[in-house]
Image (cartoon, rainbow, N blue to C red):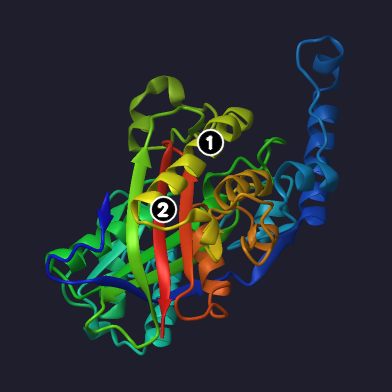
Amino acid sequence: MTDTTQLTGRPVISSTGLFTPSESISNEELVASFNEYVRRHNEANADAIAAGEMEALTESSVEFIEKASGIKARHVMAKQPVLDPDVMAPRWPQRPNDEISILAEIGVKAARDALERAGRKPEDVDAVLCAASNMERPYPAMAIEIQQALGIEGFGFDMNVACSSATFGIQTAADYIRAGNAKSVLVVSPEITSGHLNWRDRDSHFIFGDVATAVLVEDAAVAPAKHWDILGTKLKTVFSNNIRNNFGFLNRAYPENAGGPDKLFVQEGRKVFKEVVPMVAQMIVDEAERLDIDPQSLRRLWLHQANTGMNRLIAHRVLGHEASEDESPTVLDTYGNTSSAGSIIAFNLHSDDLQPGDTGLICSFGAGYSAGTVFVRKVG
């Protein structure tokens, strides 16, 4: 738990950046691909299905997807292979070690956008934190590769707290500012979540999209005149298996895994909904009261973009009424669930219209369980 008690510096958000892939998959396109896969699977296994040895797969539909999630489309880095019923996964050539990796590449694009919006040069930055759900490799750190590509001196490291990675990264950056260990820190969240999604699973094939965001956290003494004061942050984790991804380098150490199913994203959606909504709503209210902020006075909530139903209930419990699109903007419908980047996309796209003195909340929640809040107030 941290607030604005000064040690050395006073952290603020100077700017944010966004990279959006050019390709997008509509629900209609996704359903057509998935249902063709289902048709082929059921046809190839007709005898086993008829004998009761195997269950027939069920088709998906646009209505099912939108009712379950509120998602209408999602951006991806590789559209054609995802929609190919014979592949149904992102594919691109493996890059040599002397070429920038794809995750670092999109992270750099988002970081440059944030730097440009703040009028900053790379040499002004002291550190890079790569805070995301899925790293391309264990090491060297993606943050260090992004740091090198941008030409930043100082240090960088990776951190993974699933969908809460960005807010955890913001508090970490703010703590560096407070302690005087840095004046300017980039928190970069490149999320190619299409790679950990099982596109053949009806219950989850529609959830994720790809994107990259960046948040520039700086000492108020060097920040541009227009910025966001960080009033306080709060982080929380509670262990749960209800959202899990078992992929990792140790998978190859187990002989029984050879030829087995991929270790991809799985969740118990109803349990997550039931357990996370009250936890996050109470966390927001408690932290607002600790900061002497009336939660019902918050001008805008930039919530994690996972499910419209979750966001509606959380916003209602915090604000005391059904939130309007202005009070709790949605990007989920066009971006899908982008893990840690979701609340930052919402903030990036829906914050310029607020007035100096307006107070808002950036909030994330997801696997772990993990949750993070960043209360901000517009300045200038």
Q: Which residue is mark 2?
A: 288
Residue 135 appears in the figure: no
Residue at 84%, 9% in the rendered image = 51
Is any atom of residue 127 visible in this view? Answer: yes
Residue 26, x across and y down, in percent: 76, 59
State the residue at coordinates (33%, 28%). Answer: 253
Where, by quadrant of the figure, is residue 182 drawn? bottom left
* Count of number-bearing discs: 2
Please state which of residues 318 and 76 is positioned toward the viewer in this rendering: 318
Percent from the top left, x then y, of residue 260?
Answer: 52, 26
At label 1, which amino acid type do we have?
A: Pro
Q: Please tell me which residue is depicted at 39% across the width and 50% down the height of the picture.
A: 289
Choose the circle earlier in sequence order: 2 or 1.
Answer: 1
Q: Are marks 2 and 1 in contact (CB under 8 Å)?
A: no
- Which residue type does callout 2 highlight? Ala
The CA distance from mark 2 to mark 1 is 15 Å
Q: Position of residue 268 (x, y in %)?
A: 59, 29
Looking at the rendered image, the quarter that the C terminus falls into is: bottom left
In this rendering, is residue 357 above or below 123? above
Q: Which residue is mark 1?
A: 278
